[in-house]
Image (spheres, coloured by chain):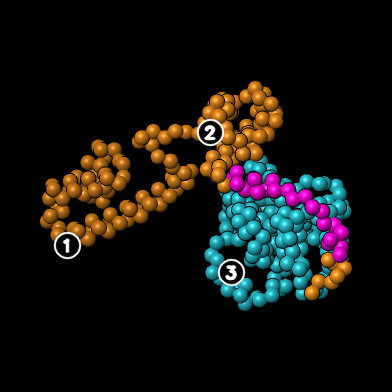
Chain colours: A orange, B cyan
Amino acid sequence: MTSKSTSSEFEKLLSSPVDEKWKDVVEFRKANKKWLSISSNIALRVMDEMDKQGIKGNELGTRMNVSPQQVSKILKGRENLKLETISKLETALNTKIITILGENEVVVKNDYKRVSEEKLALLKQEIIIEVKRAIQENAEVYNSRFARRKVFSYGQKFIRVPAKIAKKSAGKDYVEAA
Amino acid sequence: MRISSILPVIPEKLFRVVYNDNDENILVKLQDQWTDTQWLRDFFLQFKKDLDAIPEPFTVNQAVNQTISDADDLFLALYESNGENLSKLFKPLHGKKEPDIRNNQAQKGRIQRRRTWLRIYAVHFDGKYIITGGAVKLTNDMRRPHLRHEIYKLELLRSKIKLDINSNNFGYLDL
């Protein structure tokens, strides 16, 4: 049980007004979650670029021709930014902040190159094993022109190599071509 | 720093402390900080070593995004609770004061997700929760200055309302 003195001290300090502003914020953020997330990511991108270029908020404001207060709001990542403002940011920082992907474009993360190199190495090993097995099982088929074409196209499907090199290699060694 | 008053957040159940040197709503202040991209980025850059020391790898920008998402979840949980089941939302600050350790451990086992590093600190007595403050807690201990300050505020309230430190109903709690 809590002592009477604690309850009494609590009552002495207790005042009445209930401030429900925090509830309004919860409702607002729930209803606007998607664009708030985009705004925050834009702010992060802008701050990274500012650090890279060694510029402060007031310099960015001057370049954008907006007030320091406006820059501060943008960097908090809670502004529903106009396309005009985003364009100003891109011009001021001389960099792309948002990109609209074309039909034949994809997003590739920075570490894709490393991952793709690892995948490529694994794929090469798989192809080597597969080709060796096939040759052992049916040497005549794989020595035929048809078989060489199959292996060549299989390799080219996964790995872009200049056609000339691929053809040359395919002619003498299927594995190299792959 | 002194406590000037206690105001209701959810009447009869959840309260907040008002300090003499700053009369702003603590809950609103925490909401503001924990959804402020620049504030969070500065914080994680300042405590980059602590961030790098946690088992799950996070870049500063990932940590900012995670915090904003966690903060939204946390305040939404508080909002939706409407003061009910607060004992489920708030956990004892010190594990040894957990009333049923076995249940607690079982629960930890079930929850695979990383625990949030956001903390809202409160004192609990007679079914009432009184919020004293909050912090981003990246370390296991409370030795960082901003965390020590939160302990100080909890102690301040405990002392002010003359709450017995040995009372069974006493606990420093985090969300």
Marks 1 and 2 in Cβ contact (< 8 Å): no
Is A178 rendered above or below residue A53? Answer: below
Magenta segment? A8-29
Q: Main secondary structure of the magenta part?
A: helix
| Same-chain status of marks 1 and 3 | no
* Label ID, residue B108: 3
Marks 1 and 3 in Cβ contact (< 8 Å): no
Q: What subunit carries mark 3?
A: B
Q: What subunit carries mark 2?
A: A
Mark 2 residue crowding within 10 angstroms, few (<14) / some (14–19) / many (20+): some
Looking at the picture, tell me which residue is in the foreground, A36 or B130: B130
Verify whether residue B101 appears in magenta. Answer: no
- What is the secondary structure assignment of the residue under circle 2? loop
* Label ID, residue B71: none
Q: Residue at x 62, y 77 (%)?
A: B102
Q: Nearer the viewer, mark 3 or mark 2?
A: 3
Mark 3 residue crowding within 10 angstroms, few (<14) / some (14–19) / many (20+): few
* Label ID, residue A97: 2
